[in-house]
Amino acid sequence: MSLIEALNWRYATKKMNGQAVPQEKVDQILEAARLAPSSSGLQPYKVIVVTDPALKQELLPHSFNQSQIVDASHVLVFAAWDNYTEERIDEVFNRTNAERGVPAEATADYVARLKSIYIPRESEVNFEHAARQAYISFGTAIAEAALLKVDATPMEGFDNAKYDEILNLAEQGLKSVTVLPLGYRDEANDWLAGLKKVRLSKENFIIQK
């Protein structure tokens, strides 16, 4: 199946049937998320994988009681860095240089320029930037799930502060951004299943200059 075919197949599943997604497919989706591009290769986000039924039940009331949270096989929570720091930037480039076998001097000027941009900014500005990077990973995970014919429901409708508290994200310097339940559609009970996919026409979507 091509990506276009997969995107036509997928939809924001409103009701899942509780069937488990094979771990190898979940691993592929997570690997796609891990390999997604990010600004300067910093990957300023993590993915928390929730499978514990009790924990999903705890998250449910803070997700506007959307049943996908408990009916999904796996709930992926994308969480971004709460701020850019010298230590975080150094850790990324020290690891990158070590894996590439290049000296620190090779990236010293670039790292210094990044720090001059990020470090003086307000933490909220930096978090919003990190969150935008998380969205790239999030979208890549959605596309990979569609290619594997795994249903996924992109969610922003949740209480970020409560998620952060329940998942102990502040202790890790993270703040939740988006949620992606993975599972399989319950077509008989999903009002959106089978409805025509509607998007802007190409003429209205693409602006040619």
Image: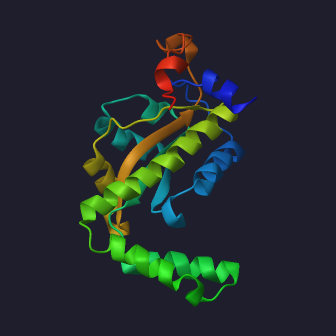
In screen coordinates, is 41 left or right of 59?
A: right
Q: Position of residue 119 (x, y in %)?
A: 31, 74
Extreme residue toward the right, this view: 1
Residue that appears at 61% across and 27% down: 7
Residue found at x 50% / y 37%: 181
169 over 77 or under it: above or below: below
The mark tally for this picture is: 0
Q: What residue is drawn where x is 58% and y is 51%? A: 33
Q: Position of residue 135 (x, y in %)?
A: 46, 47
Q: Quadrant of the N terminus?
A: top right
The vertical placement of 59 against 13, above or below, is: below
Query: Does residue 51 appear in the picture of this structure?
Result: no
Picture colour scheme: rainbow
Q: State which quadrant residue 127 falls in.
A: bottom left
Q: Let me know if residue 123 appears in the view.
A: yes
Is 67 displayed left or right of 145 in the figure? left
Residue 167 or residue 103, whichever sits in front: 103
User: Which quadrant of the figure has residue 4?
Assistant: top right
**Viewer-closest of 99 and 46:** 99
The front one of 169 and 121 is 121
In the displayed image of the protein, which residue is found farthest to the front? 209
Expressed as whole percent of the image width and height from the top left, the position of residue 120 reads 27, 74
Q: In the image, residue 110 lies at what x, y percent?
A: 49, 77
Q: Could you tell me which residue is drawn at 54 percent across and 20 percent down?
A: 202
